[in-house]
Amino acid sequence: MKKIGILTFHSAFNYGAFLQCYSLCSAVKIKYPDADIEVIDYTSKKLSDYYSGSFLKSTKSKLDSSKKSGLILKIKVLVSSIIELLIGCTERKFNIARNKSIKLGLKYLPLSCENIIASTEKEFLALFDNKYDIIIVGSDAIWNNKQTETPNIYYLHNLNNKTIRMSFAASCYGLPYKTESVHDLDYFKEALNRYSYIGVRDSETENYIHLTNLDKPIFHNCDPSLFLDLSSLPVDIESVKDKFREKGVCFDKPIIGLMCNDWLAKQVRGKLGDAYQYIALYQWNNYSDFYMDNLSPFEWALSFSLFQATFTHYFHGTMFSLKNGTLTFAIEKESDYLKNYKTKIKDALERMGLLNLYYVDNQMNANDWHRIIDSTKQGASQDYKEIVRNGIELEASNKNTFFDALDSIYYER
């Protein structure tokens, strides 16, 4: 019996982070029922501080993440954090309740008995080196050095050579990798040379690896959320409806899901008007009627099926809305990152042939909003659902090269 460890952002207070871990873990368990599979219960101290709810810790984490971005950005981050502290009391209460709800999902993961929040590779290796036959890193932005410690523990650079390393849908998303130093690129290359299989989630991560001049094949994998079977989750849609009713939602009036910040929520409500109920999912905004801070990860995953349409700038909000067959509009705000790199939402929708659902805020015109308003009134048609389903199936098939490689390793063919 082989022991397999999965290393990812499983404990972030983020529905998508938990669900992608749960999905990959479930798929590996189904395929290798005799294996001893664990989610390695390690959390980056920087990531832990970011999600802690502590003003000082989260602000320090944000400042550390922007350390290469100059004084102006640091000042903006600090001012934004102070404003949140002064006027965001209701929002903080929402976040605290939401985080408690997300944490309910952890009991469904086969967590390692060792648990650590660490900032050094030495601490990590002291617990987990030599414990596993195979370690799978991913999915999510585990290779974004701005979000993790330095050196990046998720590289597994100094792990013993007996443990087989694989990555599934790993990503560096958010990292301005074009400015990485030669030293950092060489360090990354050294780590990847020890991998038996390298699977990435998006084209920018592939480009990042190409910068290292690594002479190994790189495979594209879908985000694990796309092959999660929603019908097998340990909740049903009726329990989700009950949670909505607890908040005062009436199912006689169509519902719009808003998983977004104020800049988008304000526009959507202003364009669509009062013919709908507006529900805030995960992210607080000041333009919703109801705020769903009481959903477990599994309930959150099913909640999109209750919407006439979803508006979001979040990756997993986009993916799970699509998986539920719900009309989905992914609208991102222009940023320096978007100007220089392809975003993960655009990358995924492009691969699925669904780029018509993607917009950039300041590039939208009146005709775009007219189409969105008309589409929302009609809701998701059967043609739309079939196109989305086909796109998801196409993208989800990109997991096959990984499992073929894992087969060969697991059965030593």
Image: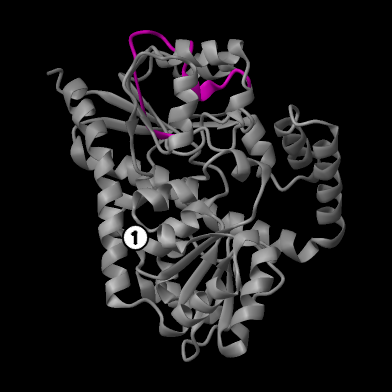
Highlighted range, magenta: 150-170
In front: 314, or 238?
314
- Tell me the residue at 47%/74% (across/down): 309
Apparent side of residue 148 relative to residue 204 in the rendered image (left or right): right
Q: Mark 1: give few (<14), some (14-19) or many (20+) Cα within 10 Å.
A: few
Q: Quadrant of residue 215?
A: top left
- Tell me the residue at 54%/55% (across/down): 314
Residue 174 lies, with reference to residue 143, above or below; the image says: below
Q: Quadrant of residue 233?
A: bottom left
Q: Is residue 124 magenta?
A: no
Q: What is the x, y in percent for residue 39?
A: 40, 34
Do we see residue 118 in this rendering? no
Q: Residue furthest left?
A: 413
Q: What is the x, y in percent for residue 209?
A: 46, 23
In front: 355, or 246?
355
Residue 130 lies, with reference to residue 298, above or below; the image says: above
Residue 79 lies, with reference to residue 157, above or below; the image says: below
- Tell me the residue at 73%/62% (across/down): 91
Please name the residue that numbered disc 1 is placed on: 234
Do we see residue 167 in this rendering? yes
- Tell me the residue at 57%/48% (across/down): 13
Q: Quadrant of the N terminus?
A: top left
Q: Is residue 165 magenta?
A: yes
Q: Quadrant of the C terminus?
A: top left
In front: 116, or 158?
158
Residue 130 lies, with reference to residue 177, above or below; the image says: above
Q: What is the x, y in percent for residue 395?
A: 30, 48
Q: Amino acid at mark 1?
A: Pro
Secondary element under disc 1, as helix, strand or loop, is loop
